[in-house]
Each structure stands twice: as C-alpha cells, then as structure tokens.
C-alpha cells in the first residue's frame, strides 16, 4: 500500500486561510465536504500515511480522486458555505440525517384576511405562524378543540367558509360557540384577526396574562351577578388551564429554550429536541443520524444544530446542548442570522446545563434520545428484509460458502485478571436465541487470547455430538437440552482484532474442524478481521450487515459482563463469609466499598477499618484471612 494518495497537493499549494474543501471521486461526484480554520492544517491530516488514518477516513480518501478547496473570509463564512454545500450535494461520507417521522404542527394562517387555525404537516404556508412540532395528531386536535372555547377563530376549510358566506348561515362550529362566525358578520374581519393574534400570543408562551385577564373578567361578572357570563369565563379559564397542564411547567415563565439530547454509538445517533417556550415544553422532535465517519460528540452536536435550524425551526435565545461544539462562536452567529430571517432579535447562546431544572430537562432529553436509539435498533433488527439482506451481505463480504444462518459470538470479561468469564451468544436467522446462550468460567488465563483458546476448545469439543448434557455453564433459568450445544454454526465471531481471531483459528485447526468460518469485530472502529489477513474488511457504516455484527457483539459483551459481576459478588461474599463476626450487612458494605477481591486483598488494615461498621479488630481479621498463604 502506498504511503499516501497520488492526488495529494504539493507542499505550499494549500492556503492557511479559512475555507471549505471537497473530495471528489473519478466521476466528479462530491464524496465529502468539510470546513477548516486553516485549510493547510486540516487537509494535511488526510494526507498522512494511509496506515495511520482511521479506517473510514482511509476509505474515503482512497475512494476520492481529487480534492479542491474554496477560501473564504472568516470561519463563519466557512460554516455557512459548508452547510449549504452539504445540503446541495448530499455527500455520502457526511452525516446523513433522517427524520424519524413527519411531525404535525399547529398553524395559524395570519397571511389570510380571515386567519384559520389548522393542524398540518405542511411548513410552507405563506404568512402562517407555526407552533410545535407535536408528537401526536390526536393530542394536537384536542388542544385546538379546547382553545377554540377561549379564542373562537375560524378552523373550517376555505370551501366551507365560502359556502357559509353565500348562504348567510354559519356552520355547526358557529352555532356551538367554537367559532366567532366572521363568515356571516357576527364579528368583523379586523376583530377576528385580533382574536387570532391573541391565540397566537397564547401559544407562543404569553399565557399568564390571558389567565389573569379571564380570571378577573370572571370575578367581575360574578360580582355584578351576571352568572351566565361568569360561567362562560369559568369554562374558558378551565380550558386554558387544561391546555397548560398538558405542557408541564419545567422552568420559569420567562425562559425560552431549545434543549437537545443526543445518544450515539459507533454507527448511529438519536437526537431529541425539546422546544420550551414560556417555561413549558411546546414540542418534541426526533431524528435518527447515520454516522458514516467516526464523529466525536462535539462534532456531532455541530451537525445536529445545522440540520435542526436549517429550514423549519427558529432557534430560541438559549440552546442547551450536551457539549459545546468546536465552532461555538460561529454557530451562535449563524443562529442569530436564522432568528433575524424571522424578524426576531437576540443572539442565541449555546450552553451546557450544569444544575437545576434546566439540567434536569437536559437529562430528560438525553434519556429520550437513548430510548429512541434503542427503539430504532429494535425496529431495524425486527425487519425481516433487513435481516435477510444483512446475512446475504455477510456471506458476500467474508466469502463464506453458505449464508451464516447460525452465528455464535464469544466475549471474555474479567476485572484486573480476576474472575475471568466468557460468554457465548447465538443468533439464528439474524435474531438472538437466548435459550441457547452459554457462559464459561475460566480458572486462569495469561491474557484474552489464552482465554479465547480455552473457551473455544471447550465449546468445539462438543460439536456434532449427540451425548451433550448441559452443565454448570448454562445460564440460570434456561431449560437443559442435549442437542443444541452440539449444533454446528456457520460463523464464529470473537470480540477483538487480529490476535483474538488468530487464536480462534488456531483452535479450529488443532481440532481438525473443516468448513467453520471465524472472524472478529474490533471495538470502536467496527472492523471485521479474518484469519491471516493484513487488513480488515470494512463494511459501510449504515449497512445492515455491520449493524448485525455490532448487535451480536454488544449482546455477547452484555452477557459476559452480567455473569462476571454476578460471579465477582459471589466470590467476594463466599470468602468473607468465612471471617468470624462478619454478617450480611457488613459484607454488603465491603462489597460496595471495594468491589473486588483483588482490591480488598490489596487494602491495608486502616483502609478496611474505614468502611462503615468495620472496626480495627474485624479489619485485622479480614486482612489476615484474605492474605493468608
């Protein structure tokens, strides 16, 4: 492999000024767009020796045939140009955004002579004021129905409105008091528009003034014994309070903020954006992000901000993010320009919430993002077409003789070399078979590769045998079977890179097993390693095959960790039970404080005595018992 690509610019050709660069393939298609404070410093990273590059960066660089750049006057201009080109060219190696659904909005068509309130997914109505997005249409319609009791503006279609004008009779909504009936002149068009402005103001967060006004009107009507009017105001006040109850108060009434939560792994990210106006959550929106290149959280935040406010949403004056992006100042200027496009003043501030209600809301957004990411993975793994495509892609990418209808993945877990365990998880037809999971205790191992050798030797010794009886390695609660541990998989997967794969392949060769494929998946870079190969197999980041590999690896890791923790606690407890005078309560305190036998054994008498409920005498006994020969 060459040290670098052939199209590398000559030293000194690349300017040191801010700008935007584009990588193109041989056909001229733009593969990646990026920005830089210094083009020379940034681009030099791409032309480092290929072996030192991140695998996915190397794939992008080697796929490209040329690089070009455009110098701009400032970092802010670079940010704007980068974003516009990403939207125009949709480069495959940039982050790909997919809204996980089309969200409904509440719109008030202030551009019309007689404004109308409506529930819509169309964001291109001229002159309309939008509120949301909301998660459920039914909840939004319920809100509109309640608000029409207070602000009875038109909600009918243009056809119904014109028919009422021609006939001189209002529709049913006019008869039941949920429309002021401007169609028949019960209210002038000017007064109706003023009513629509009040509706819009209330939805924008100026609700406390309306509540106070309606309450005063109700009390005034009751004082003059106009109980019919007082009852009407009472019903309006109840309707307002019901709407506000649906949007829980989380911050002071003066706070307008957008709170962003992000949950991500190596392949994808889920984004949740809470829109807070007047201290209340007015809308929630979510995205699913495909990560083609390996992006850290600050870079991901920058891309999320750009895509969030590019067209639909108007940024609040406070935007809460998980971490500050690298170009915070430039992004704040860009957000200010976005507010100015809507005739709104104020410079948005990017902030990481540290404490109080704002931090609690940010944590809620993060939890929702984690839930959304988990749901996305569940939906994707449950898709039969996607699973079939994944198995077919694995078959082709690894050059297998047959599709891997049964895959077994092994992972080793330990804590500082103690309590070594391993897990075996089974996926059949792309789905987990938890009744076939197995776990292994390992008495001693020099390293992870040695542990892999031991585990695979034990597992493969039972291959194709009919007289296999499950022993103590079976997960608790799993019904014993004879044949299932003898089933032959089409693919063995180990958690790790080339050393672990070589160890697994060595066991297969020593046992003389033929036709059994093996591979490894390395963490973070998500590389697939095959035996006797100098370079890994790189699957597309958004492929169903890589998603399936990641899922089976994560499941093996989870299963191993849970067994290792369970065994560690049992191991500590069994040894401490032998110490005179130690009961369950004090054993629990020791477990909580030290967490492992190794750490407890290495502790001094003074350190042990510092644990709650452990005196000097008992600490001495524990120390002597654990360190006896």
Image (cartoon, rainbow, N blue to C red):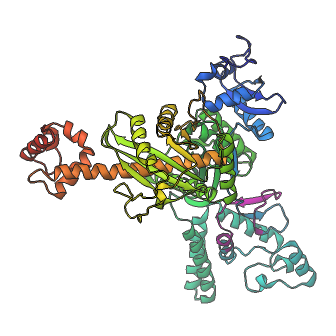
Quarter of the picture containing the N terminus is top right
Image spot of residue 73 (x, y percent): 73, 24
Q: Is residue 242 above or below residue 281?
A: below
- Nearer to the camera, 161 or 610: 610
Q: Is residue 27 above or below residue 39?
A: below
Query: Is 5 displayed left or right of 183 in the figure?
Result: left
- Nearer to the camera, 503 or 119: 503
- Span highlighted in magenta in the image: 117-141
- Residue under the point 50% across and 53% down: 464
Q: Give the quadrant of residue 191.
A: bottom right
Residue extending furthest left?
617
Image spot of residue 546 (x, y percent): 62, 44
Quarter of the picture containing the C terminus is top left
Image spot of residue 431 (x, y percent): 57, 57
Whether the magenta-drawn stretch holds residue 349 is answered as: no
Query: Is 536 displayed left or right of 112 in the figure?
Result: left
Image spot of residue 403 (x, y percent): 65, 49
């Amino acid at each position: 492999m060459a040290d670098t690509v052939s199209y590398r610019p000559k030293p000194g050709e690349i300017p040191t000024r801010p700008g935007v660069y584009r990588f193109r393939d041989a056909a001229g298609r733009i593969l990646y767009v990026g920005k830089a404070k210094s083009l020379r410093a940034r681009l030099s990273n791409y032309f480092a020796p290929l072996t030192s590059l991140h695998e996915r960066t190397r794939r992008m660089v080697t796929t490209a045939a040329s690089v070009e750049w455009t110098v701009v006057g400032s970092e802010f201009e670079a940010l704007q140009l980068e974003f516009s080109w990403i939207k125009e060219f949709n480069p495959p190696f940039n982050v790909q955004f997919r809204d996980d659904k089309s969200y409904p909005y509440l719109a008030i068509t202030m551009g019309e002579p007689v404004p109308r309130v409506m529930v819509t997914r169309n964001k291109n109505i001229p002159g309309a004021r939008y509120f949301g997005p909301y998660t459920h249409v039914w909840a939004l319609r319920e809100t509109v129905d309640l608000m029409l009791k207070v602000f009875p503006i038109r909600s009918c279609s243009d056809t119904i409105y014109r028919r009422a004008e021609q006939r001189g009779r209002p529709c049913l909504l006019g008869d039941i008091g949920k429309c002021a009936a401007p169609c028949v002149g019960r209210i002038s068009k000017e007064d109706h528009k003023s009513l629509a402005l009040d509706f819009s103001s209330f939805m924008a967060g100026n609700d406390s003034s309306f509540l106070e006004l309606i309450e005063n009107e109700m009390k005034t009507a009751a004082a003059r014994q106009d109980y019919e009017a007082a009852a009407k105001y009472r019903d309006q006040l109840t309707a307002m309070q019901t709407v506000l109850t649906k949007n829980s108060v989380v911050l002071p009434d003066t706070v307008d903020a957008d709170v962003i939560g992000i949950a991500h792994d190596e392949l994808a990210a889920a984004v949740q954006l809470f829109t807070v106006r007047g201290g209340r959550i007015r809308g929630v929106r979510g995205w699913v992000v495909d990560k083609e290149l390996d992006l850290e959280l600050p870079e991901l935040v920058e891309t999320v901000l750009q895509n969030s406010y590019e067209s639909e949403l108007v940024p609040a004056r406070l935007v809460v993010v998980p971490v500050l992006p690298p170009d915070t100042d430039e992004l704040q200027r860009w957000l200010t320009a976005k507010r100015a496009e809507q005739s709104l003043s104020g410079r948005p501030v990017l902030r990481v919430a540290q404490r109080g209600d704002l931090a609690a809301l940010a944590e809620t957004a993060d939890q929702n993002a984690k839930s959304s990411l988990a749901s996305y993975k569940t939906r994707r793994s449950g898709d039969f077409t996607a699973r079939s495509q994944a198995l077919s892609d694995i078959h082709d990418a690894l050059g297998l003789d047959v599709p891997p209808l049964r895959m077994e993945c092994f992972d080793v877990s330990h804590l500082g070399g103690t309590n070594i365990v391993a897990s075996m998880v089974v996926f059949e037809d792309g789905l987990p078979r938890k009744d076939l999971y197995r776990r292994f205790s390992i008495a001693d191992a020099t390293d992870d590769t040695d542990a892999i050798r031991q585990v695979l030797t034990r597992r493969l010794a039972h291959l194709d045998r009919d007289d296999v009886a499950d022993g103590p390695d079976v997960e608790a609660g799993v019904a014993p079977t004879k044949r299932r541990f003898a089933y032959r998989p089409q693919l063995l997967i180990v958690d790790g890179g080339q050393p672990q794969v070589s160890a697994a392949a060595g066991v297969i060769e020593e046992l003389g097993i033929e036709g059994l494929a093996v591979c490894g998946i390395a963490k973070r870079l998500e590389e697939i390693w095959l035996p006797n190969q100098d370079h890994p197999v790189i699957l597309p980041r958004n492929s169903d095959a890589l998603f399936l590999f990641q899922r089976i690896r994560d499941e093996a890791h989870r299963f191993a960790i849970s067994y290792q923790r369970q065994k560690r606690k049992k191991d500590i407890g069994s040894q401490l039970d032998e110490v005179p005078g130690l009961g369950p309560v004090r054993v629990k305190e020791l477990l909580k404080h030290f967490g492992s036998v190794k750490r407890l054994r290495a502790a001094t008498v003074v350190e042990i005595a510092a644990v709650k409920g452990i005196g000097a005498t008992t600490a001495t006994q524990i120390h002597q018992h654990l360190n006896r020969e």
